[in-house]
Amino acid sequence: MVSLLSLKGNPVNITGEENIVNPGFYMPNRMSVAVGKALHKLLDGKVCYLVDPTFPPHPEIMEYLQKKNVHIEYFDFRHTTSRAVREQILDQMHKGLSVVFLPGMISKTRGCLADVPSPFLSTVGSLHISPVPVFVGYYTDTVRDLFRSEPLSGYNEELSILPQLHPGPQTGERLLAAWMQRSTEIFSSQPLLRGSLATAIVKAMKASPKAEIIDGMTHSSLPFFKVLGVSMTVARVIKERGDKRVGVILPPGPGGTIATLSCLLAGVTPVIINYASSKAAFESTVRQAGLKTFVTARKFMQKLDTFPWPPEDQLILVEDLLKGLDKKTLITNVLMAKAAPAAVICKMFDTDSRRNNDEAVMLFTSGSSGEPKGVVLSHRMVLANVAQCASRLTLGEESFLASLPIFHSFGLTVTMMLPLLTGYTFCAYPNPTDARSLCELCERYKLTVVCATPTFARAMLRRANENTFKSVRYFIVGAEKLQPDLEKEFQDRCGVTLLEGYGLTEAAPVCAVNVPNAPLLPESAFYVPGHSPRTIGTPLPGIAVRITDVDDDTKELPITEQGMIWLKGANIFTGYVGKADMNPTIFKDGWFKTGDIGKMDLNGFITLGGRLSRFSKIGGEMVPHEGVEQALTEILDIDPTAEGGVQIAIAGVTDPQKGEALVLLSALAAHQRTSEEKEILQNIRSAMNERRMPTLWAPKYIVPVEAIPVLPTGKLDLRSCKLLAEEALASIL
């Protein structure tokens, strides 16, 4: 049932009235004045409000309640036993009153799920009263501000009464899961996400015509209106070729942006090619995507002389294309991009003809554990993920560093689409490993948002001085685990907090991220943190998390217990291209199986245990490869900051006795002599025993290698690591 209640303030959209229980114990995730009035009316005014003065509700809410002469029960859960609070609540319910817990004003980060501090969620479980979850959220119709965690003028307020939770343990965990699930449902239903990515980009670029794409190589810049005008011209050329999909082989920058936007305007799907991949991976990509045309640049081809370039008749070379464009048409389109209304441009290119779940962009996974898999990012997915990211960032006068390749979904969505759709300048550089140049760009252009892998960030730290990152407000790292030593050194040397996040190509890609903590409110003893070290942050708005048993997808676990992570949200894809046999195994009731192991705390922060593919089941126990690698880094005294890249890796191989065995791949000079293998392994086992680590974590074999295989992003090439181990041990396995 849906109703709309108009009270003083924003309109309140109400759902779930059929779930009202009288009397009941109601637990909202947050509260505004308008929602408070609506909830009071829904419960016929037969309400007692539960308030903790250490995080008091908004004064206007309290003023409204006092005018209504309602009953308020005060408590301080830090100094009151759960039994006493339980009796307070039950006394009021026995009188026929529903009890509503009022979340207070506390320090919180933008886009957080709830204004309820985690210590109180822990207390809820000890009350042994089944609550009725209430979800409250605030939504608008712009990508930049689709969701907020506080009401503002012009926002639609959502009030959802959810089904009462069943009695039992871990009520706090189940309450958090219910809020998260409803948040995802409401976010996914927003009209904005049913629109066209191309339309949204045109409108955003028209709204911020003076924002620029800075070429970090030449230091030239193109304002958005010129980028749009050139893209409109190129789009006509691409459309004339009649392809459904076109390969884009370009680095981040004006060229890559224009090629991608031109395809979108032409109604063609840009397939962003991984130009760092092998010949076999490239050929697989071309075959799976059905590509016959590719956009690239002659200068870029010269730099990648070993890349398996397609025949020349299949290439659209940017330099030749721009020279051949009719100058009059180009000038007309640039002037139109500057002066014509966005609606006129969108109508010219019929941008709304492809929207919602239609494919917008196609990417391929890195292939770290096998053949690259095709992932279609729909218009809906990209719009959703950009809005989700923007909802967690406090965007002011921002400027982005765009050095991650756009064939990497993070580079595509966060450092290209996010600035385009929110109207911010970005400085592009084609080589994410050129740390010296990246540091110079950060300082020269006073960039505020930097995104990198920990490997690239470590290289930047070596080249940084005290002024390099002075302007940076968000330094976000992902794609591999953030090591504590790197986090500490960045903070000590540069005063920068590295914010670890987590994403998947299949999720367009960002799923969770840490953000800086908000300043504490002097009147409140509690806060909802934005950052928690050793975690990947909290899920973005509109993303729900489920945890299941690693060995049994049907066995759901409390979100605070470690298991398989499943995700649901508008940013999640619907399946790999051409993988009809695989897709049913990774989806269940609308949930996507990530392949990652982890758990969540009551603040919503997720701690990863590793990829399922990075575990070995030995003697019935799950052994994490990354955990073993971290332990060996300490035991073998390996300096992770030293030049030379990754020195060790763990791989799993079949073992007839215990199912699997761990293999230590080592590029260390001390491990190159086979005659010393037994002694080295024994020393490792002894060191692990001294540290009281499980004996199952000790490697059974050492395989000396010249170099540890890694992908261009710095992540381990898991498939190659496993092959190296299996080849070396083929005679004894």
Image: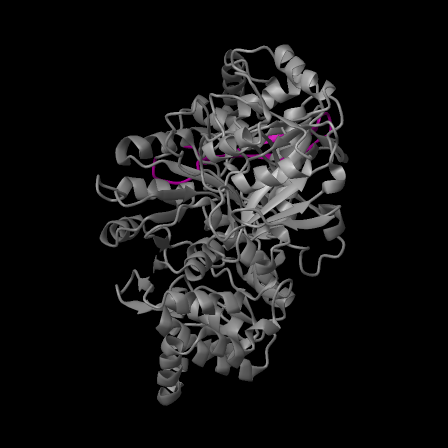
Q: Nearer the viewer, residue 497 or 259?
A: 497
Q: Residue at x 41, y 58 (%)?
A: 419
* Count of numbered tags: 0
User: Can residue 143 be seen here?
Assistant: yes
Point out residue 654 in the picture as x, y percentages from the top left corner. 69, 34
In this picture the colour scheme is: one colour
The quarter in which the C terminus is drawn is top right
Q: Nearer the viewer, residue 526 or 380?
A: 526
Q: Nearer the viewer, residue 260 or 56?
A: 56
Q: Nearer the viewer, residue 327 or 701?
A: 327
Point out residue 178 in the picture as x, y percentages from the top left corner. 67, 36
Q: Is residue 586 magenta?
A: no
User: Can residue 561 be seen here?
Assistant: no
Q: Residue at x 61, y 62 (%)?
A: 194
In this picture, which residue range is highlighted in magenta?
A: 642-668
Q: Is residue 656 magenta?
A: yes
- Image position of 657 (left or right of 533): right
Q: Residue at x 28, y 43 (%)?
A: 469
Q: Residue at x 59, y 59 (%)?
A: 193
Point out residue 577 in the picture as x, y percentages from the top left corner. 67, 60
- Image position of 441 (left or right of 526): left
Relative vertical location of residue 249 with respect to residue 447 in this rendering, above or below: below
Relative vertical location of residue 75 with respect to residue 372 in this rendering, above or below: above
